[in-house]
Image (tube, rainbow, N blue to C red):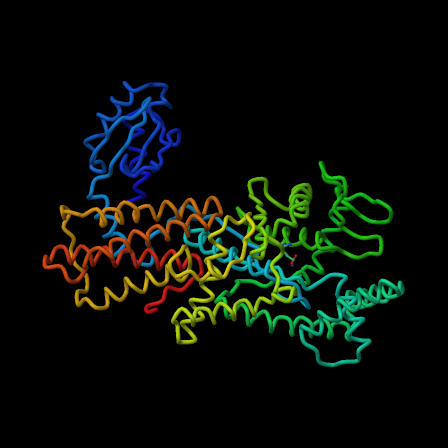
Amino acid sequence: MGLVRDRLLSVIADAAGIESDKIKIEHPEVEEYGDYSTNVALIVKGGRQVAEEIAAKIKSDDLIEQVNVAGPGFINIKLNQKVFIDTLIDINTQKDWFGDNQTGAGKTFVIDYSAPNIAKQFGIGHLRSTIIGQAIYNLYKSSGYKTIGDNHLGDWGTQFGKLLYMIDKSGQKTYDLEQLEKWYVEFHKAAETDKALEEEARKWFVRLENGDAQAREMWKKCVEVSMAEFEKIYDLLGVKIDYVYGESFYEEMMKDVIEEAKKSGVAKLSDGAWVIEVAGFETPLMLLKSDGGTTYATRDLATLKFRRDTWNPDVVVYEVGAEQELHFRQLFAAASMLGYVKPETKLVHTKHGLYLGTDGKKFRTRGGNTVKLMEVLEEAIEKAKELGCKDEKLATKVGVGAIKYFDLLHNIQNNIVFDWSKVMALDGNSGPYLQYTYARTQSVINKSKAEKSDLLPNYKTNKEEQSVLRWIYRYPEVMEEATIRLAPNLLCNFLHELAQRFNTFYNQHSILGDKDEETVNFRLELTRAVGQVLKNGLGILGIEAVEKM
Ligand code: ARG
């Protein structure tokens, strides 16, 4: 049937005699003015008079209950109640599919996200990437795209030379992630005074690259112990990424990239290194260092080539922090010089912001140390228990959901001031509030015996019911916009407003207790629909809707 908005657009376009993509329609700030307003009269360069004429033409359309013209020629439109009732029916029949669309049918979407580094803690920045990346993945999947998630693990590079040197020196056969991190720090301290260490590390990396068995085995162990820690976090977050082609996967492919870049003349020799000069950048992109080492950028070029050959994507999104902006700008330019992206393929770097403490400085523990992600998640679960979620499983869903929601509520590029009182606020714009509201809808539905009731198209709605109706039909629109704009925060705010409107209704009216059967039926279907949309929306955000709370 299509979005209400799109149907209305074509009605207006027909009446005005122009194409619908030239017209803007939006929701007026003040809801009393109408559900939509349009500037169509101004677009056709008419004033009030023209607006009145268009208004008169569209007035009798099925979708519309009332039209009026305001100011210099804005047309305000109130939707027919039938539209709202039909929406409720759609929601309650399409259920989990309500809000999905097919705008991406036939197109392929790749998202590069999470990407923690081997031998380092899973950082809070990688948490952001994981949470946002998963939400964007879900949005695109629900828009009909063939969707591919790839965890571009940091498992290669000269830093492994340093690590292998330290491991070898220690003589230790077993070690954990924490130990690896310590060695890495120790190496750097020692290397400040002992210049020979860098050379030792380089040698180890060469051994690793040349396939030396001992080096490979130590490296593999680093990957294993790190992944074991990362898996705990992914499990807790309920995130599973389609592919984990880490940087090491591109080892062989880099050779072709380097060869091609040299042959085509895209790469230039500079002080013994091969670089790619990108217009607008003072420092070129390093392709092959003078010591023969490859770089993060070399691997990213090989990755793009591989993605083109394997998936032929229409869009590739890199969910990575803003601090890597220069890297990605150079990468995208170099990749297009090398022909590794089709001209019509869109490459996007999301540039997410940082986590800050309530003091506005970098997020740290009370003791001033870097925050360990596992501890943050565990604290969230503890706090969910304080909210009354006694059961461990439930507390995990609520605690982890709270962290995810708080992250997604922020515009991706903004910094996040991490404030526990907001993260867990049962009465604020928070995950727990939405889960609580969902549980409330389910408790009503479970109490009623009715399977499903028919809705009367002319049921007389009260103010609070209308307020829910005038909001919930917008869900598919919001989904579309959140997808196009890579903005899960739009979805968060929509769901929060929906929950608030529902709770206002719930607090003022009895649902099952009303004497009138039609009223009970209507309210039940309304409650069902609100629950369904909350569940669908939370699902996109990667948050589980809980039956009881
Ligand atoms: N591992 C990298 C880091 O932590 C992020 C990788 C992002 N993805 C990419 N294709 N470069 O900084």
Question: Where residue 36 sits: x, y (%)?
Answer: 31, 36
Relative depth, front residue between 405 and 89:
405
Question: Where residue 320 sits: x, y (%)?
Answer: 60, 53
Q: Residue at x 74, y 61 (%)?
A: 157
Left or right: 116 as drawn, with respect to 407: right
The quadrant of the rendered image in which ligand 1 is seen is bottom right
Relative depth, front residue between 374 and 63:
374
Question: Where residue 258 sits: x, y (%)?
Answer: 75, 51
Q: Residue at x 69, y 72 (%)?
A: 222
Task: Report the number of discs.
Answer: 0
Q: Residue at x 84, y 52 (%)?
A: 290
Q: Residue at x 89, y 65 (%)?
A: 196
Q: Is residue 276 above or below residue 373?
A: above
Q: Is residue 529 above or below residue 191?
A: above
Relative depth, front residue between 313 and 485:
485
Quarter of the image that includes the C terminus: bottom left
Quarter of the image that includes the N terminus: top left
Question: Looking at the rendering, which quadrant does residue 542 occupy?
Answer: bottom left
Left or right: 326 as drawn, with respect to 359: right
Question: Where residue 218 sits: x, y (%)?
Answer: 74, 74
